[in-house]
Image: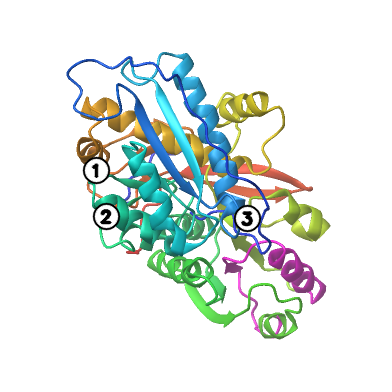
Amino acid sequence: MRSRKGSTLLALLALLALAMVAVGCGGDEGDTGDGGDTGDGGGKVIIGAVLGMTGDAAPGDVPASEAMEYAVDEINKAGGIDGKQVELIIKDMKSDPALASTVTQELLDAGAQVIVGPAFPGMGAGAVSTAAKENVTVLSACSTQPEYTVVGGTKAYLVAFGDNVQAAAAAEYALEQGYKTAYTLTSPDLSYTERLPEFFTAAFENGGGKTIGNDTFTIGQQDFAAQVTKIASLDPAPDVVYTGMFPPDTAVFVRQLRAAGVESALYGADGCDQQPLIDQAGKDADGIVFSTHGYPTPGSRFEEFVAGLEEFQGKPPEAPALATTGGDVIDVIKAAVEKAGSTDPAAIGDAVAQLQDVEVVNGTITYAGTNGVPQKTVAIVEIEDGQFVFKDQFIPSFIPEP
């Protein structure tokens, strides 16, 4: 890993919702807290998770929630946080923005001292605004959309890197490969697919590159002939094509792009970090480069965490990179409670804002001096011979404002 300086998600998106049922899990019910604690959790650390366990947010929130359960179990077996057992209460807000406030209030009534919000900003707005009335902080485990930090009318926090950060990392890596020209593909259907190319362009051009064109697409479209024809007509061809699209769209697009004879590199974001991209694109997936949360390099915390999660749940996690963000959010909460020396919600919130260089599953994370989009390392992965291959991990040197 390189050491870099820089200022300061979602991660996996899907077109089909996962039909899964929310579950709640709790730690030891015993009161092991000290008498000086000012929280009202009866000596426990109570984490409330308002998640889309069913519906559009499920592809991100389900793996993150499973990892949160594992991380809490590990903490409790090791004695808890400052001697206090952790209780994790997960409630399904069904990816329905209208239910976020209601579910959040239920968790607050159950004593939640910190809230983990759903994957998308629009779904999290009600959670943030409701929690704020009781001075309870909201963090999202897997969202990468910077607007999450302000969408509820008060400060919230990303635990994953922001889209501005991961796009900047992709741009910096592209420049290091000697690429000088880029073409971008944007979809206004989601802020994720709309803003990633914007952030990439800002960072790429800041580093001396030039964006020579942009086109739009619709999420879920099956024919990219119009977009591919425009790219194929460029002379010279762009060195790299960057887009925030995700499978199955990425697979359809790259097959058509290669069939048209376009050999430009294809760069994407964390939505590409899933096995279906390779399964659907076949040999055309080779050479795709994307930014993601982490990678199981030998001896890494990522490798250790995923192996432990597999043993805990009796099966390999379906989305390992997204699952690790669930580990990250528990690491952040643990560090905040320890720093606060209290389970008082306001104290925990103040502590989150001051955290620096906290070790999490995916590298380190810093909130001090940020607007809620953390300084966090970004991994770069390339598909080679049908396998995900680690290339680098760093904080980009230039990060566009979100």
Q: Quick one: 127 or 203, which is closer to the camera?
A: 127
Residue closest to the eye, 173 or 290? 290
Residue at horizontal 47 percent and vertical 54 percent from the top: 143
Label placed on residue 353: 1
Query: In the picture shown, does residue 105 fall above or below 343?
Result: below
Type of amino acid under label 3 = Val
Decide: few, some or many residues near mark 2? Use Cα within 10 Å; few <14, some 14-19, many ≥20: some
Membership of 37 in magenta stretch = no
Which one is in front in this view, the residue at disc 3 or the one at disc 2?
2
Q: What's the amino acid at mark 2?
A: Lys
Q: Position of residue 304 (x, y in %)?
A: 58, 25
Question: Which circle, 3 or 1, is nearer the viewer?
Answer: 1
Pointers 3 and 1 in contact (C-beta within 8 Å): no
Locate the C terminus and report the quarter of the image it occupies. bottom left
Q: Which residue is mark 3?
A: 289
Relative placement, left or right, of 136 versus 38 is right
The image quadrant of residue 86 is: top left
Q: Which numbered disc, 3 or 2, marks the residue that appears first in the sequence?
A: 2
Secondary-structure class at tag 3:
strand
What residue span does the magenta drawing correspond to? 232-261
Give the amino acid at mark 1: Ala
Above or below, comparing residue 385 to residue 297 in the picture: below
Q: Give the residue drawn at x 45%, y 14%.
A: 78
In magenta segment, residue 257: yes
Q: For mark 2, what is the residue?
A: 155
